[in-house]
Amino acid sequence: MTTLSVEGLRAGYGGGTVLHGVDLSVPSGTALAVLGRNGAGKTTLVHTICGLIKPRAGHVRLDGEDLAGRPAHRVARAGVALVPQGRRVFASLTVAEHLRLSRRKGDWTVPRVLELLPRLDERRRHRGDQLSGGEAQMLAIARALLTQPRLLLLDEPCEGLAVDLAERVRAVVAELARGGLTVLLVEQQPEHALAVADRVALLADGVVASTHTADELRADPSLTDHALQVAQH
Ligand SMILES: Nc1ncnc2c1ncn2[C@@H]1O[C@H](COP(=O)(O)OP(=O)(O)O)[C@@H](O)[C@H]1O
Ligand SMILES: [Mg+2]
């Protein structure tokens, strides 16, 4: 079964096109990382998948149902959750309030997410602006899980975190993937992608240039060179 299938996806801003026909698929219960340099269009890709940007062409199929062009709230209701770049937690809401607001009925309950992310339990009464970057990232993940996603999108979740916290975040995402959640992670750093993903798609020049198993990339790290090299001006 394929949870997410993206075909010929084109999107951009104003007169500029960023995604020139992206194809990728994420089999159910697996984790795919999309790797690309800064400005490659990773955030544009996840925003287009979750309906924040309207695609100009192409398909976004979730369990076979085409969601392309639907507004974000309907894509969310269909079971797509985004952990956004920069976490985006509310400064004035406490951890407990964030969790209450995100909660929908389903297998992911507040006690279950707090068991997965025990640090949040200790921080229940703290406001968003009192959290460290790592704690805010855990909260962003908790919030997404409480919406009971079929597909979890994560946009550079380790960005700006100290090494030990980045490792903790990676371990949590890897545990979710091992537990059967379908994950699409966009990343700039191969080591973060490889810590979590079964397969890695390389995004360059607005298309997926190639897709590799994690083992293939570990064996030949130079495969990522084209996707990660800084653009020539
Ligand atoms: N809101 C926006 N308006 C116009 N251009 C944008 C906007 N957001 C991103 N871009 C441009 O789209 C391209 C891809 O950006 P983005 O998807 O954020 O890349 P990444 O997440 O891989 O760093 C970049 O050239 C960026 O400048
Ligand atoms: Mg980005």
Image (cartoon, helix red, strand yellow):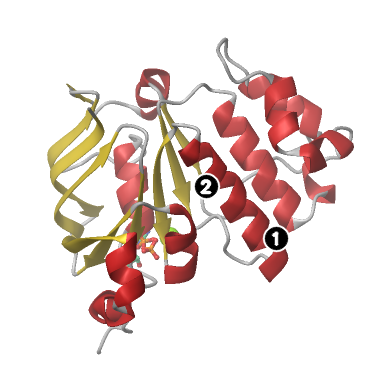
Please count the marks in the image.
Answer: 2
Q: Eyeballing the image, is 86 above or below 26?
A: below
Instruction: Where is residue 105? Give x, y as percent.
Output: 57, 10
**How busy is the neighbourhood of tag 1: few (under 14 within 10 Å), some, or many (20 plus)?**
some
Quadrant position of ligand 1? bottom left
Q: Which quadrant does the C terminus fall into?
A: bottom left
Q: Eyeballing the image, is 160 above or below 25?
A: below
Q: Which residue is label 1 attached to? A: 165
Q: Looking at the image, can residue 135 be seen?
A: yes
Q: State left or right for residue 228 relative to residue 141.
A: left
Q: Which residue is label 2 attached to? A: 174
- Specify the amino acid type for callout 1: Leu
Q: Nearer the viewer, residue 114 or 157?
A: 114
- Specify the amino acid type for callout 2: Ala
**Image point 49% across, 63% down: which residue?**
192
Q: Looking at the image, can residue 87 be seen?
A: no
Instruction: Where is residue 90? Give x, y as percent.
Output: 70, 40
**How busy is the neighbourhood of tag 2: few (under 14 within 10 Å), some, or many (20 plus)?**
some
**Image point 62% across, 32% down: which residue?**
143
Q: Nearer the viewer, residue 223 or 4?
A: 223
